Amino acid sequence: MTSTDPAAFFREMLGEWEKMANKVGGDFARSDEFARAMHGAGAATMNTQEAVSAMMARALAAANMPSRAEIEDLSGRLARIEDQLGRIEGLLGGKPDRPARPKPRRTRKPPQAG
């Protein structure tokens, strides 16, 4: 290197460092140890998630509260009941008439109380 520009020297050194780091990182990522470590980390994450889920289920059961799965099941049941009611209303001639709500007036003044 014949240039006296410190920024050029820094860029060149950074480029060389990146090449070296990429080579070392690539070699490590292809190794069996890395694959085993990643597999172990994934398995540990799954085991932790299962343990937390089981703990939450036990805590909710102890508090006599429904679990997420039970809430989702109830939600599905309620949706099916609402669909059936909609079909029944359609067979009986439509939805019952509801009284129309009065719309608020569009003015700049606030509504009068009382």
Image (cartoon, grey):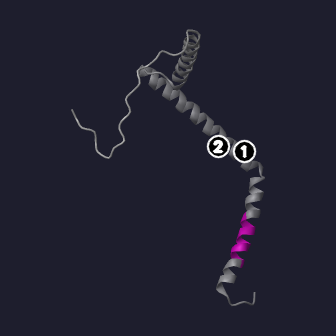
In-image side of 106 versus 47 (left or right): left
The N terminus - image quarter: bottom right
Residue range in magenta is 12-21
Q: Residue at x 69, y 90 (%)?
A: 4
Query: Are the residues flagged by discs 1 and 2 in contact, CB closer than 8 Å?
Result: no
Front residue of 33 and 94: 94
As drawn, the residue found furthest toward the left would be 114
Is the residue 51 above or below the residue 24 in the image? above
Where is residue 30 shown, x and y percent of the image? 78, 53
Location of residue 28 (image quadrant): bottom right
Are there few (<14), some (14-19), or many (20+) residues within 10 Å of tag 2? few
Of helix, strand and loop, which one carries label 2?
helix
Residue topped by disc 1: 36
Is the residue 68 above or below the residue 20 in the image? above
Q: Does label 1 or label 2 sit earlier along the sequence?
A: 1
Where is residue 96 shown, x and y percent of the image? 48, 15
Where is residue 16 shown, x and y percent of the image? 73, 73
Q: Residue at x 50, y 28 (%)?
A: 55
Residue 98 is covered by the magenta coloring: no
Q: Residue at x 61, y 39 (%)?
A: 45
| Amino acid carrying mark 2 in the image | Ala
The C terminus - image quarter: top left
Are there few (<14), some (14-19), or many (20+) residues within 10 Å of tag 1? few
Where is residue 54 shown, x and y percent of the image? 53, 27
| Amino acid carrying mark 1 in the image | Arg
In-image side of 62 versus 42 (left or right): left
Q: How far apart are labels 1 and 2 at the CA level?
A: 9 Å
Residue topped by disc 2: 41
Is the residue 44 above or below the residue 16 in the image? above
Front residue of 53 and 101: 101
Of helix, strand and loop, which one carries label 1?
helix
